[in-house]
Image: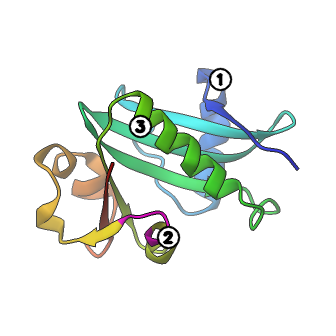
């Protein structure tokens, strides 16, 4: 199977919400203006998604997710690679994320665990940081 990643279209956000919700990932703020989602297509079907919430030259990675039945086929890695390429071409130098389940996964790609207070002021002001993710979520950072 071949994955085709691209920026999500407005009419695909309902499918993204369903995919996120089915994997117990947050959906409350995905329509915010500074959040961009990408989809991974297998044929015409959305089988993966990842998002980014941008603040100048830094951003918060949002919800890497692969549809059940398509996991363990490198689709997550391909989506992350697509997002990192987007960061490179858009001068995003620092990427943060919050996770309760995937710390080991993101370590493989160079993300390092940091203390909550080490996150930048902009990232600390996000809804995900303040109230969507639990305080127990691990904060990770990747500097490009």
For the record, the magenta segment spans: 107-111
How busy is the neighbourhood of tag 1: few (under 14 within 10 Å), some, or many (20 plus)? few
Question: Along the horizontal axis of the image, is 70 left or right of 112?
Answer: right
What residue does disc 3 label? 87
**What secondary structure is the magenta-colored segment mainly?**
loop
Residue found 48% across the figure and 34% down from its top = 86
Q: Secondary structure at mark 3?
A: helix
Residue found 36% across the figure and 25% down from its top = 33
Q: Secondary structure at mark 1?
A: helix
Query: Who comes first in sequence, dot 2 or dot 3?
Result: 3
What residue does disc 1 label? 11
- The foreground one among 98 and 128 is 98
Q: Secondary structure at mark 2?
A: loop
- The foreground one among 116 and 111 is 111
Q: Give the Cα distance between marks 3 and 1.
A: 24 Å
Q: Give the Cα distance between marks 2 and 3.
A: 18 Å
Camera-near label (1 vs 2) is: 2
Q: Quadrant of residue 67?
A: bottom right
* Image coordinates for residue 74, horizontal then vertical, percent: 72, 60
Camera-near label (3 vs 1) is: 3
Question: Is any atom of residue 66 visible in this view?
Answer: no
- The foreground one among 11 and 99 is 99
- The foreground one among 69 and 135 is 69
Q: Quadrant of residue 110?
A: bottom left
Mark on residue 85? none
* Image coordinates for residue 82, horizontal then vertical, percent: 57, 41
Question: Along the horizontal axis of the image, is 55 left or right of 6?
Answer: left
What residue does disc 2 label? 108
User: In the rendered structure, does residue 108 fall within the stretch colored magenta?
Assistant: yes
């Amino acid at each position: 199977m071949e994955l085709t990643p691209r920026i999500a279209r407005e009419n695909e956000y309902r499918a993204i919400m369903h995919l996120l919700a089915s994997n117990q990932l947050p959906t409350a703020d995905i329509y915010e203006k500074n959040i961009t989602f990408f989809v991974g297509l297998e044929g015409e079907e959305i089988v993966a998604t990842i998002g980014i919430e941008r603040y100048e030259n830094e951003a918060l990675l949002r919800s890497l997710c692969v549809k059940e039945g398509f996991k363990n086929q490198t689709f997550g890695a391909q989506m992350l690679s697509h997002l990192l390429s987007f960061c490179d071409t858009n001068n995003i130098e620092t990427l943060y994320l919050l996770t309760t389940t995937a710390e080991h996964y993101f370590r493989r790609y160079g993300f390092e665990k940091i203390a909550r207070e080490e996150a930048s002021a902009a990232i600390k002001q996000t809804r995900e940081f303040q109230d969507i993710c639990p305080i127990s979520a691990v904060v990770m950072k990747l500097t490009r």
